[in-house]
Structures are given as C-alpha cells and as structure tokens.
Amino acid sequence: MKVVALSGGVGGAKLAFGLNRMIASDDLTIIANTGDDFCHHGLPVSPDIDTLIYTLSGLNDDVRGWGLRDETWAFMGALEKLGGETWFNLGDRDLAMHVLRREALDKGQSLSTVTEYFRRTLGISARILPMSDTSVSTIVETVEEGLLPFQRYFVQRQSLPKVTGFRFEGVAQALPPSGLLTAIQKADRIVICPSNPFISIDPILAVPGIRHSLIEASAPVIAISPIVNGEAIKGPTAKMFRELGFTPSPIAVAEKYKDFLNVMVIDETDVETSNMSKINGVEVEVAQTIMRTDADKVALAEYILRL
C-alpha cells in the first residue's frame, strides 16, 4: 500500500512514526511543512523536517517534545555570555544537522537532496520530502505587533499576540520537489496528520500544484482532527481558531479541507461530534487519536490504514 502523509512537527511526527512502523518501506512518503524554516546564526533550521527525522529514527526527546534525547546546551550558554540571541535553542548535538545542511546547501544541493541523505544515513525507511526546495516563510499577522516571522511569534513571543491571519512569503514561486506530485497521484491512502491546519498544513497546500493534486487524487483523503473537545493536544491551534472567529472543533477543521477531504477521524472522547456520521458531507470515523505511547501511534496508524 502506497501512503502519502502531510505533516507538521510534533503531532504529525507521532502519527508518521506509527505509519512508518506499519509500512516500513519507501511506500510511505511524508510531505513536510517548511514554512517554519528560517536562518538562525547563519544556520538553516528546518524544525518540522528535523522533528520528523529525529522521531522516525528514534532519536527524539519524547519528554520535551522536540529536539534530541540527552541533549546538552553548552553552545547556548557560551552564546549568551557573548551577547548572542538565545530565544531559539540550538542543542549541542542538534547543531550537527544544521551545520551539514548549511554545507550541502552552499554546495548547491537542494533541501530535498540533503533531507534524503539524512533519512538514509539514519536508517529511516519512509521518504521525507519538503513541500518545496525553495524558501517559503510563514508570516503571522498579529494585532499587537503587526507582521511576525513564524519563529518569532511561536518561540520568542510564545504564541501570545492575537492572530488576524497568515501569509506564506515566496509560495507563489515555490515548486514541489521531484516526485511529490507523483506520490500523491499513485497513493492508495492520503493522510492529513493531526497538525495545526493554519501553520503546518496550509503552507503545504499553498504550494502550487499540491492542493489541486489532492482534489484530483483517486485515493481517499483522511484527516485526523488536531482538536479534541474544543482544545488542541499541543500548541496554539485552538487559540488561532478562536482569534480568527471560529469555534475550534473537528467541524472547523473539516471545513478547511472540505474541497478534497473524504474522511475525518475524531477522538472517541469528543462529545460534540462523536455521534455524527458526517460533517458537511465528509465521513466521520471515531478512534483513539491521542497518542501518548508508541503503541498508541501504531494503533492509530493501523486504524487509518484499515479504513
């Protein structure tokens, strides 16, 4: 079975881990959001790609939710003493990824090429494709501070400013990397991971050709709601829905994907929608979607592949 999954960071990586355990081959293609990418202290940082790589290779820090397990922070301590910006943490071991990525990009390699190198080197069976090899930057429109680059909003300002909208700078000129649209066309299942629709999935869908390919796909498109009982499992998803004038719910998520979505998977504890058979014409399936353990991740992936 050929499966394509669209993923952001932590939540998406959890389901990607389960799918990778179930498929364990390059029949699984994960399309990663790169709208979060930015250059920090001269190094190209790809947070969602790195979270996927660390999670699928078993190197991630489950407690913190991001970065590498058993990380140390001597670099950040030295940086602070020299007066450098320390609002975004770069771990000592994590630096290796960014340094090698910098070297590869400077030699003219594409982001998808260097990502492929990392996944093969770390023994990951699934293909991980960035949504584009060219830069796309998510800009958050806020009430208090105007336009904020995503990492400034999310990390430095801890998602506190009120959101009024989003821009994806550079997306009009972006192109999907080689093989991405073909993977969607040949897929037997397409999965929208439980990632933030606004800042993780929308940037992917905004890349020319991707949303259209989902609309035209012969495979069923299945989304897992990142909202359970009106709240997000992690991150500012519910806050963003409210600030943009929507009630956070699986119904609101399904509305965002309605032009290509076939099935919405909601959590068994979601009292608002667990008794619904359809949401605006989209089929509803009920499962345990909160992934606390590796067994939960695999169980949800197995359920999705059976649909």
Image (cartoon, rainbow, N blue to C red):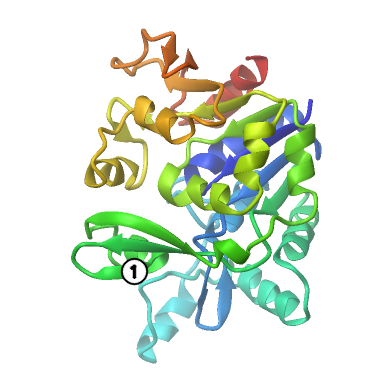
Above-or-below relation of 297 to 96: above
Above-or-below relation of 241 to 188: below
Residue 180 spot, x, y in % from top left:
74, 48
- Taking the image as shown, residue 42 lies to the left or right of residue 117, namely left
Q: Nearer the viewer, residue 269 or 136?
A: 136
Which quadrant, please, contains the C terminus? top right
- Taking the image as shown, residue 165 lies to the left or right of residue 302, namely left
Q: Nearer the viewer, residue 39 or 149?
A: 149
Residue to which mark 1 is pinned: 148
Tell me the crowding category of disc 1: few under 14, some 14 to 19, or many 20 or more residues within 10 angstroms, Cα based. Answer: some
Residue 5 spot, x, y in % from top left:
64, 37
Residue 183 spot, x, y in % from top left:
77, 40
- Number of labels in the image equals 1
Q: Could you say whether the residue bearing mark 1 is in a helix, strand or loop?
A: strand
Residue at x 37% of width, y 12% of height: 274
Q: Nearer the viewer, residue 295 or 193?
A: 193
Residue at x 46% of width, y 71% of height: 73
- Taking the image as shown, residue 278 lies to the left or right of residue 53, namely left
Residue at x 74% of width, y 57% of height: 177
Judge whether residue 20 can be spotted in this image: no
- Taking the image as shown, residue 302 lies to the left or right of residue 159, namely right
Which quadrant, please, contains the N terminus? top right
Which three-letter amino acid code belongs to the residue tagged 1?
Leu
Judge whether residue 82 can be spotted in this image: yes
Residue 264 spot, x, y in % from top left:
49, 22
Above-or-below relation of 265 to 133: above
Q: Nearer the viewer, residue 245 or 29?
A: 245
Q: Quadrant of residue 263?
A: top right
Q: Seen from this angle, which residue lies furthest left?
A: 144
